[in-house]
Amino acid sequence: MQKPMIAFFTAEPSTIERGQASVLKWEVKGADSVSINQGLGTVSATGNRSVFPSSTTSYTLTATNAGGSSTESVTVNVTAPAQVAPPATPAPSDDFGTMISKLIQDVYF
C-alpha cells in the first residue's frame, strides 16, 4: 500500500496582520486519518479552517494509512497592525475680538 498523497495544503493569505484570519485549505487522497497540529486536531480529508494566529505560526498536516504517513507544512506570517497617525491638532483660532484688536494694532502701528 502506498502512503497517502497530499494534493495540496495552503494558507490564504499566507501573510496577515495580527487579529486577521488566514484560511488553511487541504485535500488528501488515500488516508485513513488526517490531522493538523497547533490544536486543530483530526480533520476530514478535504476541508478548510480559519485560523487567527497572534504570531507567525507553522501548521503541519499529517496524513496516515497502513502504508505510512505523509506530511506537508505551511506558515502563516503575522505582522503588526499598521500604525495610524493621530489626526493633526488644529491650530487654535483667534476669536473675533482678538482678530479686530490685531487689525487695529496693524493699522495704527
Image (cartoon, helix red, strand yellow):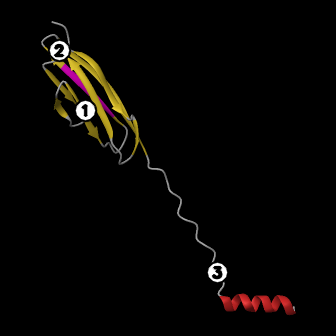
Label 3 or label 2, whichever comes before in sequence order:
2
User: For the N terminus, which image quadrant?
Assistant: top left
> In the rendering, at what x and y percent does residue 24 appear?
29, 32
Q: Residue 48 carries which label?
A: 1
Most extreme residue toward the top is: 1
User: For the C terminus, which image quadrant?
Assistant: bottom right
| Magenta stretch, residue numbers | 58-63
For disc 2, the neighbor class at 10 Å (few under 14, some 14 to 19, many from 20) is: some
- Going by the image, does 99 lie left or right of 66? right
User: What amino acid type is highlighted by mark number 2?
Assistant: Gly
- Going by the image, does 69 lie left or right of 56? left
Circles 3 and 1: CB atoms closer than 8 Å: no
Residue topped by disc 3 = 93
Q: In terms of depth relative to the viewer, which is nearer, 13 or 56?
A: 13
Residue topped by disc 2 = 30
Residue visible at 63% across and 79% down in the picture = 92
Instruction: Report which quarter residue 45 is drawn in.
Output: top left
Q: Regarding mark 1 in the picture, which secondary structure is present there?
A: strand
For disc 1, the neighbor class at 10 Å (few under 14, some 14 to 19, many from 20) is: some
Label 1 or label 2, whichever comes before in sequence order:
2
The residues bearing labels 1 and 2 have C-alpha atoms spaced at a distance of 18 Å
